[in-house]
Image (tube, rainbow, N blue to C red):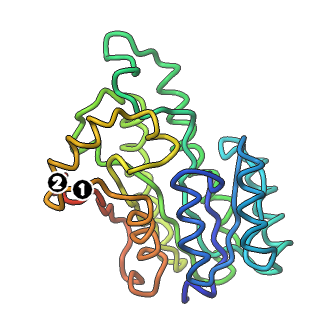
Amino acid sequence: MQIAEQIVLVTGGGRGLGRRIVHAFADQGARVVVDYRASREAAQELADRLGPERAVALPADVTDRDQVDALLTAARRHFGAPVTTVVNNALADFSFNGDARPGMAEIGWAEFTAQFAGSVRGALNTIQAALPQMREQGFGRVVNIGTNLFQNPVVPYHDYTAAKAALLSLTRTAAKDLGAHGVTVNMVSGGLLRTTDASAATPEAVFDLIAASTPLNRVTTPEEFADAVLFFASPWARAVTGQNLVVDGGLVMD
């Protein structure tokens, strides 16, 4: 299925990286569901700018299955067709500032619980809620947003990194389970992006250090990252599933 024929749910789509992913799909002619939890005004402004035929802003905390089910129902009602594609981008409250994050000696289980709920439970909810609509079509695309930190844990984001590593495992087991239904499940993993809401707190010196450490000598942008998400939704990736593509300018080579 061409991207222009797809109806795409982007969780956490009202701001940051999610907003860029929404724009990337819309630019290719897809219809987009802009999910939000707290960023109602930003999500609605984005949907209004794209127009009701191209986008709709709908609320749902992805950790709540009932809210996700209601989101999928409302999306189908709005567009008059089933959702084909899910991008699990929503991020539980987190700031990418290593100096402000607790180290291994201080971090508590509550921080891990919050990140696992957002990354793993949230993705599980959206996949399960969208699956009936995907099975109906014999087609589905799931793209989970990961991180290069489980290959290169240079900052003490213990909770975030562990949750994203678990999401990679879910990506692969889901790919194995759902392939027979025409559903592919993949992950796109980035490093620090310049700049999103979450990375706005990152000191400039860290951006400079990362840029100097990459073969491309620069920090990846949200727009460049979104291009890789489009790839997994496109016909060019129709035989690709269960994979993790690292998009970080070559900082991590795995």
| In the depicted structure, whether residue 28 falls above or below residue 211 | below
Residue 113 badge: none
Left/right placement of residue 33 relative to residue 124 reads right
The residue at 44%/33% (across/down) is 201
Q: Nearer the viewer, residue 49 or 39?
A: 49
Residue 218 badge: 1
The residue at which mark 2 appears reads as 214
Residue 170: x %, y % from top left: 44, 52
- Quadrant holding the C terminus: bottom left
- Few, some or many C-alpha atoms within 10 Å of disc 1 (few <14, some 14-19, many ≥20)? some
The residue at 82%/64% (across/down) is 73
Are circles 2 and 1 on residues that touch, CB within 8 Å?
yes
Q: Is residue 236 visible?
A: yes
The residue at 63%/71% (across/down) is 8
Residue 153: x %, y % from top left: 24, 36
Q: Nearer the viewer, residue 218 or 15?
A: 218
Secondary structure under tag 2 reads loop
- Quadrant holding the N terminus: bottom right
- Few, some or many C-alpha atoms within 10 Å of disc 2 (few <14, some 14-19, many ≥20)? some
Residue 250: x %, y % from top left: 19, 59
Badge 1 amino acid: Arg
| In the depicted structure, whether residue 223 falls above or below residue 37 | below
